[in-house]
Image (spheres, coloured by chain):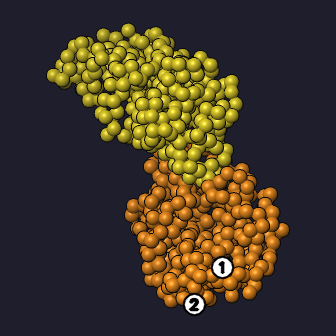
Chain colours: A yellow, B orange
Amino acid sequence: MQNRRIVLASRPTGWVTEDNFRLETVELPPVAEGQVLVRNEWLSLDPYMRGRMNEGRSYAASQPLNETMIGGTAGEVVESRNPKFAAGDKVVGYFGWQEYGVSDGSGLMKVDATRVPLSAYLGAVGMPGVTAWYGLNRIIEPKAGETVVVSAASGAVGGVVGQLAKIAGCRAVGIAGGPEKCRYVVDELKFDACVDYKNEDVSKALKAACPNGVDGYFENVGGAIMDAVLPRMNAFGRIALCGLIAGYNGQPIPIGNPAWFLVSRLKLQAFIISEHLDVWPQALKELGAHVAADCIRYRETVAHGLENAPAAFIGMLKGQNFGKQLVKLT
Amino acid sequence: MQNRRIVLASRPTGWVTEDNFRLETVELPPVAEGQVLVRNEWLSLDPYMRGRMNEGRSYAASQPLNETMIGGTAGEVVESRNPKFAAGDKVVGYFGWQEYGVSDGSGLMKVDATRVPLSAYLGAVGMPGVTAWYGLNRIIEPKAGETVVVSAASGAVGGVVGQLAKIAGCRAVGIAGGPEKCRYVVDELKFDACVDYKNEDVSKALKAACPNGVDGYFENVGGAIMDAVLPRMNAFGRIALCGLIAGYNGQPIPIGNPAWFLVSRLKLQAFIISEHLDVWPQALKELGAHVAADCIRYRETVAHGLENAPAAFIGMLKGQNFGKQLVKLT
């Protein structure tokens, strides 16, 4: 039986290119006692993968060269020699950019794909959703009536942040690129306002959108966006630092005036969701209920076929996706 | 009876100059029922005063023009019509840059000047000491064996930070300007090491001084110093942001590479000690005991006479003081 996979062929310098990846076909070994064979239906593409492509010190090990690109996957068990799984089970795992995965069951989670769609377990009811949940509830700790701002607001994480903030009784203000994304954030995700960083003076637009200032800021972007938000922060504001996508290709993203931290006695806390496994059960339960009840909505951009994963990934890093970026493999 | 005082004559643009101040002589009204008259013996000069001299939004109201410069004072009651005080009592207050102060007793604290010197109540057993105590114990929360770095280490706040860190079982590393201050920090304050930012490559010297990385950083300075410390921070490091003296005259002090916050999942928390009055009694009690037991040491730079306060203040902003900057009025 054959398995197609994409490996990291070389490390990017600056922007990722398709040359950094290589599509390979390899033989799948037979399923051994205790193992399951999973056919991946969905592949998750996420900004954190860009960091893993670099060498050098970071919060996680580098993606090794010539190995299958890492990543979350959702699919179906096609053969099981493990009593905990049966053929036909829908499962979420971490098999990376390949069509099949073999596992002894560890790291594999059976999910109910009738209540919410299978792909949601890679988005609003998966890692991005839990990331939003943790940053908002454990770092920003919003109180009803406060204002929460989130950058990359139409993305898989940002969209959930704002909707959870609304559920918590806050004013939710997004920052996104372009009128279409901003309309979606306000009209469909029900944020109170959204600033279009591509077409508006972010500082002025934020001031107008946040008449009572900003109490919590969920940061996915960094750079000029953070510089525009800091002066709008209220005393004792909290910043959850989740990502700095503006700098993922090596661009400088200084914080221009850190005196705002002092002036407004701000807290900034960076986090990596994989280090907070204790919150996952509670977060996933709440997120699943909200999605099932249509209180949390999301959008997906779907590329088709493993061979198109590199182009989709590069597009996502350039902000060409709209909502959660996925690759449909089947 | 006459009282000499220094008022803010004009707001500085860039460096403070003596022209920004004016010495005045005013009449003291007679002491009314319930009031006390205090002769100030010591005047505290502190970096935070620089921020108050600016107009515009900050964490505290601006120092008004043509009013007595604010500031902590220590002195002796010379006349009391308040049953809680008697002539001869040593008291700490907030009378500002003047020779006498009149109070109804609020904000005035009787102190024991036999156990520790009166001037210590403006330094290690006063606001600077409590600032050090709060930032270290409530934000950095050091564990024995960790490494704590503090900038402006020979100053009134920084010296206490490192000594409290040593008491907590940590490795204490200072950053200070010049070999004399660094020697003092190591030889007299018993820090484990001190980096001379004027004569050393701070990044390299920090790496050598912190073989196990940096777990807690107490920041008084900002700018290039912070940029040098961030890459040395360990995962889950904590930064107490107390001051940014490098930017007090309007110099840009960007944080060059905030990606370190994310890479090392850092927490940064800014604070103003006057907003944490709940910790003062415990902190002052501990600090007083440590000073009395010679476990916390400090140095003072003393200017003599009210008329010399402006020059001493300007010198302190330029780092010309050594330890706590005071003005002796009597």
The quarter in which the N terminus of chain A is drawn is: top left
Relative to B59, residue A9 above or below: above
- The chain ID associated with circle 2 is B
- Residue at horizontal 36 percent and vertical 25 percent from the top: A290
Residue A142 at x, y percent in the picture: 45, 40
Quarter of the view holding residue B178: bottom right
Amino acid at the residue labelled 1? Gly
**Left or right: where does residue B8 sit relative to residue A298?**
right
Depth check: give the residue in front, B122 or B111.
B111
* x then y, percent, for residue B125: 52, 76
**Image-based side of B47 in relation to B2, left or right:** left
Q: Can residue B288 be seen in this view?
A: yes
**Badge 2 density bin: few <14, some 14–19, many ≥20, Cα 10 Å:** some
* Residue B201 in sight here: no
C-alpha separation, residue under disc 1 versus residue under disc 2: 14 Å
Quadrant of res B285: bottom left
What quarter of the picture does the C terminus of chain A occupy? top left
Q: Kindly identify the residue that appears in the image at 62 percent across and 28 percent down.
A: A195
